[in-house]
Amino acid sequence: MIFQRSLIREFSLVAMAVVGVLLAIILTRLLILLLGKAATGDVLPEAVFGLIAFGILNYLPVLLGIAVFAAVLLTLSRSYRDSEMTVWFTSGLSLAAWVTPVLQFCLPVALVCALLSFAVSPWSQAQSVEYQRLLLSRDEVAGVTPGVFRESRNSERVFFVDKLSADDAEVNNVFVQSTERDRMGVMVAERGFLETAENGDRFVVLLKGRRYEGTPGTLDYRTVDFDRYAIRIEAKEAKREAPTNKQKSTLDLFDDPTPPHAAELHWRFATPLAVVIMGLFAIPLAFVNPRSGRSWNLLLAVLVYALYSNLLSIFQAWTAQGKIPVWLGLWPVHGAMVLILLILFSRQLFSFHKLILGR
């Protein structure tokens, strides 16, 4: 029991390190992507962290599966390199004795992955899409940032404000360029603010400014000075699209068992199951032969994991296309991996028994 607790503790430490590294990579990628959109005004700055949180929830099941596989593989490989496995075998214990502590480590993580895969990830994807839809529904001046040119969605207006007032109620040094009926208008004003009429219409009100209007390439221009000029803000409701299979709840998928829905259900079942299968697969793959180098088993493990993951994706696509019966789905891939796992264990256990009988 002391040895198992120590082993699970080492598994956990390695897994947390792997998750930390992978999360850092994903966070960096998402942050760069969303900050770029925020700089162009496509995403509100205050929405960046919310979208990052939704993205992390989507990636978590895969990250936990990779972390479990890497934790078991690296821990057992270290035991081979440090000759701990030699002591283990000479004590009369076989490789199968590692199954119990590995399962004690894998099963709780698999349960967490099941919760994420069946409930949290679909919810987060649906919320992320809805969040972005709400952002697209905001009016065209909501994303105006001081010091940044902001173009409207229909490319008919360009806004620029120099700075905000002390109470954020007004903007100073406003520039607006608009195009209407092939005539371009440019307005500059000292101040501006938002105003809501009694009927609910919203306006951008400019104070003490000048408007230049004309057709580019001609001399037909006119200049108008104004004390107050109101521009109506066109409200736009972003279209609510039908949810994708990944955004639908598990109960909705069960209620309508079409091939695409069945393929998504098989994938959600595969996520926690893959945690257990690959965690056990890491036991025979961790074998290190000092004569053949210390990195060959890691390379083989990466190839096995990539093959397993790609086969799951291929069978999911075939199930969605109706090439595979919905009741079969991804189970041939799991069955093949379990069969290979049993063959590897039997070979190593047979070699262990030969070694014991020889002595």
Image (tube, rainbow, N blue to C red):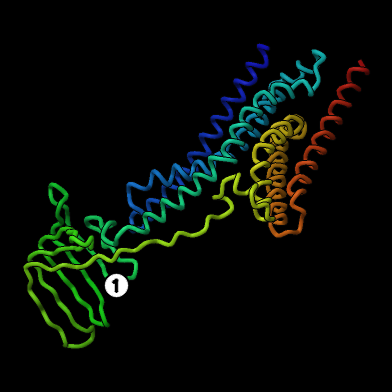
Query: In the image, 243: left or right of 209?
Result: right
Residue under label 1: 156
Residue 163, image x, y percentages = 17, 54
Decide: is 226 above or below 161: below
| Residue under the image location 68 percent in, 31 percent down | 73
* Residue closer to the observer: 260 or 142: 260
Residue 57, image x, y percentages = 51, 41
Give the total number of marks visible in the rendering.
1
Would you call the spot at circle 1 few (<14 residues within 10 Å), some (14-19), or many (20 or more)? few
Task: Assign the N terminus to one quadrant of the image.
Answer: top right
**Label 1 SS:** loop
| Residue under the image location 70 percent in, 39 percent down | 301
Residue 189, image x, y percentages = 12, 65
Name the outermost residue toward the right.
Answer: 358
* Residue closer to the observer: 222 or 10: 222
| Residue under the image location 70 percent in, 36 percent down | 278
Query: In the image, 343: left or right of 88?
Result: right
| Residue under the image location 59 percent in, 41 percent down | 117
* Residue closer to the observer: 355 or 121: 121
Query: In the image, 158: left or right of 32?
Result: left
Residue 114, image x, y percentages = 61, 36
Task: Assign the C terminus to one quadrant of the image.
Answer: top right
Can you tell which quarter of the image residue 317 is in? bottom right
Decide: is 253 above or below 293: below
* Residue closer to the observer: 296 or 196: 196
Tell me which amino acid carries mark 1.
Glu
Decide: is 39 above or below 24: below
